């Protein structure tokens, strides 16, 4: 960074919004990825004008910018590249408008995701996307990565709940896409292009989000099976009948072993029946009269080979109890090994059983613990390869295993990422899924939006 540039940033933002001290740089050197890179500076814009001027200065001085929300991603999407400046949107946290009559909310990128849903529910509405980090992640990061969560099986991912955007392109133009209506056929659909583009095309400064009527009630089923295969077959049966659950989560055999060994009281409280090798968590939502009908239909679809037990919960207390094991899983998995290589691959739902079988075979071939769980109703599993980063031979096996997993997923007609995004960690795998002419067009779009390549270099696209 040129000596004159940091004072320019300070003059623009003020001394309490531009930092280059070692402590701040270290804090913003990484996201949840187990790697880091020190930035040259960290900036905290508070309005769209600040973002425009930051991008203008970056172009003038040929400085790369790395966008950041809460830093809760795990694919290196918010990790700086050498010589870059971090632009943190956490101070742009204004809810600009809450239009109850038209069921929409206009927000800045720094708003915490759960706050949007919490405010919506005060007026009988909801914001449907529910990423696991919703209590602290920012909506800007959700928009950048097209985040999802358990409710995506019924309601879709973030992209499906965005009506319009305002954004700043890589050459400091302010653009607007979409609008305030649920039907829109005037312009190219830049909204859906920008959501999931990981900040490589433009920085979103305002989003108009679609809200839905909140369901009156929710009911939960915890379903135990004697094999992974039978649980996956049950998922296919559920997703081919008329009642769509609002959550359909899977925990494989190794997930349950992790809970048994490291879950402590949570595993004991779950009281799974003997012989349980896989668990499905299934939820239905709607009005008070209809949810029991939905639950009965789901129970019918879930019944089949190797079924050991179905427990239902219709009250808040019962639902919390049934979710105990699933809520404790992430903590238990982290105790298996120091490093977790987390892939969030996705396959067609009808091929979920083949994916789980492939994962089991990879664990045996490479002699590594692999824990698979996640959003089975979308065919989206979080595949966690557990390794000791202090053992180079084990790391090498894990890398080979990871590549084999990706090839298996592509072979099943699947995709590299269901909700975490590509970031810096997966971009070298992208050509396995996206053909050369399509990649060439994507690079052309990048150049059109960001001619000098200042926005989030080293992310999303392969070199």
Image: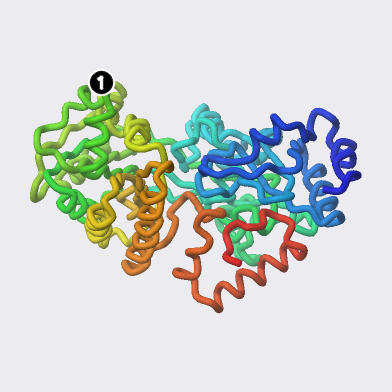
* Residue situated furthest bottom in the rendering: 437
Name the residue located 58 percent from the left edge and 39 percent from the top edge: 71
Q: Quadrant of the C terminus?
A: bottom right
Where in the figure is residue 252, as x and y percent of width and height? 24, 45
Question: Which quadrant of the figure has residue 455?
Answer: bottom right
Give the vertical position of 329 relative to 317 (above or below).
below
Q: Which of 331 and 238 is in front in this view?
A: 331
Name the residue located 35 percent from the left edge and 59 percent from the top edge: 405
Where in the figure is residue 95, as x and y percent of width and height? 66, 34
Where in the figure is residue 387, as x and y percent of width and height? 37, 44
Q: 155 left or right of 114?
A: left
Where in the figure is residue 354, as x and y percent of width and height? 24, 61
Please tell me how many numbered marks the rendered image carries: 1
Q: Can residue 34 be seen by looking at this rendering?
A: yes
Q: Name the residue under label 1.
A: 265
Q: 3 left or right of 332?
A: right
Name the residue located 74 percent from the left edge and 45 percent from the top edge: 85
Name the residue located 30 percent from the left edge and 43 percent from the top edge: 249
Q: Which of 180 and 377 is in front in this view?
A: 377
Q: Which of 408 and 290 is in front in this view?
A: 408
Q: How is the image coloured?
A: rainbow
Give the vertical position of 94 relative to 67 (above or below).
above
Q: Can residue 217 be seen by looking at this rendering?
A: no
Question: Which quadrant of the figure has residue 330?
Answer: top left
Secondary-structure class at tag 1: helix
Q: Nearer the viewer, residue 304 or 402?
A: 402
* Mark 1 crowdedness (10 Å alpha carbons): few <14, some 14-19, many ≥20: few
């Amino acid at each position: 960074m040129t000596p004159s540039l940091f004072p320019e940033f300070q003059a623009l933002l003020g001394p309490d919004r531009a930092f280059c001290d070692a402590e701040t740089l270290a804090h913003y050197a990484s996201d949840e990825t187990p790697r880091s890179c020190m930035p040259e500076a960290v900036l905290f814009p508070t309005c769209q004008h600040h973002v425009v001027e930051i991008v203008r200065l970056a172009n003038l001085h040929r400085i790369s910018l790395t966008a950041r929300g809460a830093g809760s991603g795990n694919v290196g999407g918010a990790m700086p590249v050498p010589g870059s400046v971090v632009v943190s949107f956490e101070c742009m946290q204004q809810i600009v408008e809450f239009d109850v009559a038209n069921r929409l909310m206009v927000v800045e990128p720094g708003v915490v995701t759960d706050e949007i849903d919490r405010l919506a529910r005060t007026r009988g509405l909801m914001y449907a996307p529910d990423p696991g980090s919703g209590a602290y992640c920012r909506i800007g990061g959700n928009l950048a990565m097209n985040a999802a969560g358990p409710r995506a099986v019924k309601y879709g991912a973030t992209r499906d709940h965005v009506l319009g955007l305002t954004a700043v392109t890589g050459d400091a133009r302010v653009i607007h896409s979409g609008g305030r209506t649920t039907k829109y056929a005037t312009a190219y659909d830049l909204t859906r292009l920008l959501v999931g583009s990981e900040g490589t095309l433009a920085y979103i400064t305002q989003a108009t989000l679609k809200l839905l009527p909140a369901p009156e009630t929710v009911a939960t089923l915890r379903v135990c099976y004697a094999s992974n295969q039978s649980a996956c077959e049950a998922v296919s049966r559920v997703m081919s009948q008329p009642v769509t659950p609002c959550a359909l989560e899977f925990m494989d055999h190794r997930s349950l072993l992790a809970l048994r060994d490291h879950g402590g009281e949570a595993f004991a409280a779950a009281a799974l029946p003997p012989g349980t090798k896989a668990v499905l968590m299934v939820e239905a939502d709607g009005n008070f009269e209809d949810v029991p009908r939905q639950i009965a239909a789901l129970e019918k679809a879930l019944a089949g080979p190797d079924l050991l037990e179905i427990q239902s919960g219709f009250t808040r207390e019962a639902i919390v109890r049934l979710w105990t094991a699933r809520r404790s899983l992430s903590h238990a998995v982290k105790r298996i090994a120091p490093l977790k290589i987390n892939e969030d691959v996705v396959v067609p739902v009808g091929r979920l059983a083949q994916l789980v079988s492939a994962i089991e075979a990879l664990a045996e071939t490479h002699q590594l613990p692999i824990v698979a769980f996640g959003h089975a109703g979308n065919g989206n599993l979080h595949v966690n390869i557990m390794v000791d980063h202090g053992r180079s031979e084990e790391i090498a096996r894990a890398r080979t295993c990871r590549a084999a997993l990706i090839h298996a997923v592509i072979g099943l007609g699947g995709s590299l990422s269901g909700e975490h995004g590509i970031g810096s960690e997966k971009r070298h795998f992208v050509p396995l899924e996206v053909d050369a002419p399509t990649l060439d067009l994507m690079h052309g779009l990048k150049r059109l939006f960001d001619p000098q390549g200042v926005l989030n270099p080293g992310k999303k696209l392969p070199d």
